[in-house]
Image (cartoon, rainbow, N blue to C red):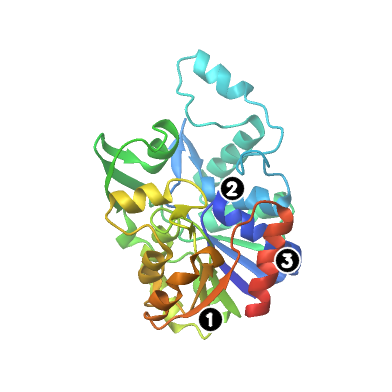
């Protein structure tokens, strides 16, 4: 079984590749819930839903998130009533959030709700939240404290980042099934997601880093940085503003305490020795996934390596 620690859009590319090569019961995704939020009273889980829609084949290929060919009539009506419309919720996507919120209010855990959604969307791979607790990520910026989605979507990543806060994370526990998945995995893969706001919250859940140290499976990370640029989103900007070097070396250093293998892009081969100095095995290959074939190809190369 391959276990993948994942954010949303960036991770879903590689998840799609693995899903095309592995039997469903051989793939488990542990998803970031640090970007969860409440909007119009609904519990929104952007990263979990992006993975869910990717695995069921319904994701919008133009954006990498949301549902393909969705409409936005409800959101438009809410705006006409005076509601905020900066967070794009499609009509069919809203059904997911309404159903999730209803089930949570009935007493189901987020793990149970996510499993029920997987069943409804006919997803047979396992999708687990990192924790059942509500642990939204907040960013301290030059414009004050912002929820992660406010920073990413409403403000378009423009504010200058000063610090991160994974709220309530100290009281969180790994969701049911997370420990078992990591300890029984044949390999654990950290997707090429933002290390601060996608992988970081997962690693901040008490006990998860320890599980990554304990597992007998190789723990592998795929770089989200190529030639000092992020493959997706504001990763480079955020790293720079928090005084990290924008390079794969900085990513490897963040993960070195539990990592076995670092997958470096072939364009950054000159960094191999720097990363090997962290006592890590370094594999160099093309990590850029521009189409479905590229996603499957990278997944295949990683499976061959594992």
Q: Which residue is mark 2?
A: 49
- Element type where label 1 sits in the image: loop
Residue 73: where, in percent of width, then height? Answer: 63, 21
Residue shown at 42% from the left, 34% from the top = 156
Instruction: Give the mark, 3 or 1, whose residue is nearer the N terminus.
Output: 3
- Residue 255 falls in image quadrant: bottom left
Tell me the CA gap for discs 1 and 2: 27 Å
Say which of 274 and 203 sits in front: 274
Residue shown at 58% from the left, 37% from the top = 98
For this view, does 34 lie left or right of residue 2?
Answer: left
Cβ atoms at labels 1 and 2 below 8 Å apart: no
Say which of 94 and 61 sits in front: 61
Cβ atoms at labels 2 and 3 below 8 Å apart: no
For the N terminus, the quadrant is: bottom right
Tell how many labels. Answer: 3
Specify few, some or many for label 3: CA neighbours under 10 Å numbering under 14, 14-19, or 20 or more. some
Frontmost of labels 3 and 1 is 1
Residue 24's disc is: 3
Does residue 46 sit above or below 222 in this rendering?
above
- Element type where label 2 sits in the image: helix
Q: Which residue is mark 1?
A: 218
Instruction: Give the mark, 2 or 3, whose residue is nearer the N terminus.
Output: 3
Residue 100: where, in percent of width, then height? Answer: 57, 44
Does residue 19 sit above or below 121 in this rendering?
below
Is residue 205 in view from this perspective?
no
Tell me the CA gap for discs 3 and 1: 21 Å
For the C terminus, the quadrant is: bottom right
């Amino acid at each position: 079984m391959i276990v993948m620690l994942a954010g949303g859009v960036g991770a879903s590319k590689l998840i799609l590749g693995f899903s095309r090569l592995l039997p469903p019961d051989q793939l488990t995704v542990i998803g970031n819930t640090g970007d969860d939020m409440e909007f119009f009273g609904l519990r929104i889980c952007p990263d979990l839903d992006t993975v869910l829609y990717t695995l069921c084949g319904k994701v919008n290929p133009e954006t990498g998130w949301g549902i393909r060919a969705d409409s936005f009539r409800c959101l438009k009506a809410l705006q006409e009533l005076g509601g905020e419309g900066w967070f794009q919720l499609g009509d069919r996507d809203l059904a997911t959030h309404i159903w999730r919120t209803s089930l949570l209010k009935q007493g189901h855990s987020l793990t149970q709700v996510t499993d029920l959604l997987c069943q409804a969307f006919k997803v047979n791979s396992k999708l687990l939240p990192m924790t059942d607790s509500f642990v939204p990520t907040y960013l301290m910026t030059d414009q004050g404290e912002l929820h992660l989605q406010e920073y990413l979507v409403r403000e378009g990543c423009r504010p200058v980042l000063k610090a991160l806060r994974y709220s309530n994370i100290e009281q969180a526990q790994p969701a049911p099934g997370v420990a078992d998945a990591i300890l029984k995995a044949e390999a654990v893969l950290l997707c090429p997601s933002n290390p601060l706001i996608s992988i970081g919250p997962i690693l901040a859940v008490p006990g998860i880093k320890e599980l990554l140290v304990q597992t007998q499976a190789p723990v592998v990370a795929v770089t989200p940085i190529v030639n000092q640029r992020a493959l997706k989103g504001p990763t480079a900007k955020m790293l720079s503003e928090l005084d990290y070097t924008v390079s794969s070396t900085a990513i490897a250093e963040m993960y070195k305490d539990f990592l076995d293998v670092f997958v470096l892009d072939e364009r950054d081969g000159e960094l191999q020795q720097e990363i090997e100095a962290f006592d890590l095995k370094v594999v160099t290959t093309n990590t850029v996934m521009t189409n479905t074939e590229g996603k499957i190809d990278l997944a295949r190369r990683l499976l061959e390596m594992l």
